[in-house]
Image (cartoon, grey):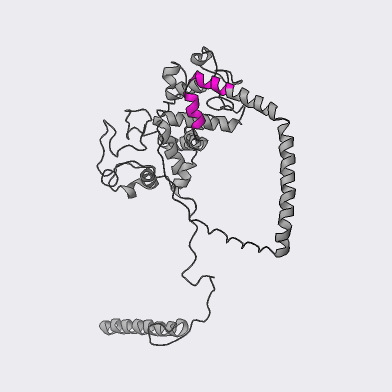
Amino acid sequence: MTLTKVVGAFCGALLIFLLGGWAAELIYHTGGGHGDDHQQAYVIETGNDEGGAEEDTGPSFEELFVAADAGKGERIFNKCKACHQLEEGANGTGPYLYGVVGRDVGSAEGFGYSGSLSAVADVWTPQNLSAFLENPAGYAPGTTMGFAGVKDMEDRANLIAFLDQTDGDTYEVEVPAAAEEEAPAEEPAEETTDAEASEAPANDGAAAEDAASDEAASQEPASDEAAAEEAATEEAAADDSAGGFADVVAAADPADGEKVWRQCRACHKLEDGANGVGPHMAGIVGREIGSVEGFRYSNALQELDGTWTADELNAWLEDPKAYAPGNKMSFRGLRKEEDRAALIAYMQSAAE
């Protein structure tokens, strides 16, 4: 009897299960898979018949990196300080990060790597660093780095921009060209009627008379302009005789200097009176050394005389420690002359 009861209970449960499936099929049946040809009850219009609109992914990493704020990156670096140092050769739990941007992977002397990094990349380009910092364990499985990662791409760009300025040699990133917008079609030139053609000589004559009157008027201050030009030429010649670096600055592109400026804006501002970690750079060219009000200079700079000419700034930016031994500026300098010239040209243009 017990066995009969168990079998009966099992059959009853199976019957209930089958009846439940049959009832659900009647209620929720969509016609798929049984040869029925039912139409969908209604269609939601999306406005795109070709598979949906392409999502706006925002700016690329390259665009964010070019416009990155090294000052913000320095604050993000606080997450890294427990394991990494910025001084060359100062390894800790992790390898030192001085000059890491553009450095060969696994090349920090004296640090024992896990070996998983060299399997996925050869050089720490900004793009490779971004991918690694986003998810270290996912980028290089087996790495001993336990950091969870920096998920925000803009934060990664700022952090890498800060690390990029540690050795004074910035890494140039090529921004992918955006899709060119179609130029608006040029309007067809209006046909000139016979009446307009007949009026043209008269208009030309009037224009000639206007030109003649303008020329006569311009001849009056010609002597003053010539004198001014001559004075400017003499002043330029005097500047040229002072040194050749001024010519390099004059030929430099301020737009290139704006990129180099990324290394400076963590400590300096271009607004007059806006001191930060360092003094403001407004009107730096031609300004007396150590003369910014409200900023406390080191004794090394206070003892210097003279003004910040292009040549003086060139020597200072190349090697601040050698120019003024004992100064508090930790920046190691810009090794490339063209970078120094472009930076000075940019600071001059910003002050105008």
Q: Magenta segment, which residues?
A: 234-251
Percent x, y of residue 3: 26, 82
On the rendered structure, is 181 left or right of 129? right
Percent x, y of residue 348: 56, 29
Q: In the rendered structure, does residue 237 fall within the stretch colored magenta?
A: yes
- Image quadrant for the N terminus? bottom left
Task: Say whether residue 249 is visible.
Answer: yes
Q: Main secondary structure of the magenta part?
A: helix
**Residue under the point 44% across and 26% down:** 331
Task: Say whether residue 269 is visible.
Answer: no
Pick the front one: 147 or 109: 109
**Residue under the point 74% across and 44% down:** 210
- Image quadrant for the C terminus? top right
Point out the residue furthest to the bottom here: 36
Percent x, y of residue 179: 48, 56
Pick the front one: 87 or 270: 270
Q: Please, is residue 266 above or below residue 63 in the view?
A: above
Task: Tell me which corner region of the image, top left, top right, bottom left or bottom right, holds residue 16.
Answer: bottom left
Q: Please, is residue 2 above or below residue 333 in the view?
A: below
Percent x, y of residue 20: 41, 82
Q: In the rendered structure, does residue 1 fall within the stretch colored magenta?
A: no
Number of numbered discs visible in the structure rendering: 0
